[in-house]
Image: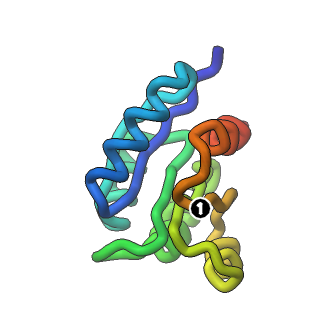
Amino acid sequence: MTVTRVLIVDDVEQVRRDLRTALTLTGNIEIIGEAENGLEAVRLTEFLKPDVILMDLEMPVMDGYETTRKIKSLYPSCRVVTLTVHDYESARVRAQESGVDAFLVKGAPVESIVQTISSQKE
């Protein structure tokens, strides 16, 4: 079984905790770190080398769009899956332009998140 190494990036601690708990139960996802803002995410990506980053879009310090652009420029093989409350076309377009590999809306079933993360593994 291939394990996908995931970095969770969200400014809300409860969201990070809930995602860590739910995703760890799947067995094939390892949460290797958490960041509460984009700047921290870039630093952790350099150190931890995740397979996939589960990225919120709206965060302090550096938002998910800018963070994705930065990470994709430095680590193009790292996959970024956006998980956001902003389910509108302009957010999807902006995320895609930033280099996001997949777009999910918060509240999506855990199975959907797991499937999207696992399908991002090259």
Residue 96, quarter of picture: bottom right
Compared with 61, 40 (above or below) is above
Q: Is residue 89 left or right of residue 36?
A: right
At which x and y percent is residue 37?
32, 65
At which x and y percent is residue 71?
50, 62
Pick out the residue farthest to the top: 1
Q: Is residue 79 left or right of residue 39?
A: right
User: Residue drawn 42% across and 74% down?
Assistant: 58
Q: Is residue 115 left or right of residue 35?
A: right
Q: In this view, does 27 lie to the left or right of 37?
A: right
User: Residue drawn 37% across and 43% down?
Assistant: 18
At which x and y percent is residue 65?
52, 74
Residue 24, quarter of picture: top left
At which x and y percent is residue 69?
55, 71
Query: Would residue 75 be visible to someone looking at this image?
Result: yes
User: Residue drawn 65% across and 61% down?
Assistant: 103
Front-most of residues 31 and 104: 104
Front-most of residues 101 and 27: 27
Quadrant housing the N terminus: top right
Residue 31, quarter of picture: top left
Query: Would residue 121 be visible to someone looking at this image?
Result: no
Label 1 CA crowd tier, 10 Å (few <14, some 14–19, many 20+): some
Assign a secondary structure to mark 1: strand
Pick out the residue farthest to the bottom: 90
Which residue is the site of mark 1? 105
Compared with 25, 6 (above or below) is below
Q: How many labels does the image show?
A: 1
User: Residue drawn 60% across and 45% down?
Assistant: 109
Front-most of residues 20 and 39: 20
Q: Looking at the picture, which amino acid does disc 1 mark?
A: Val
Quadrant housing the C terminus: top right
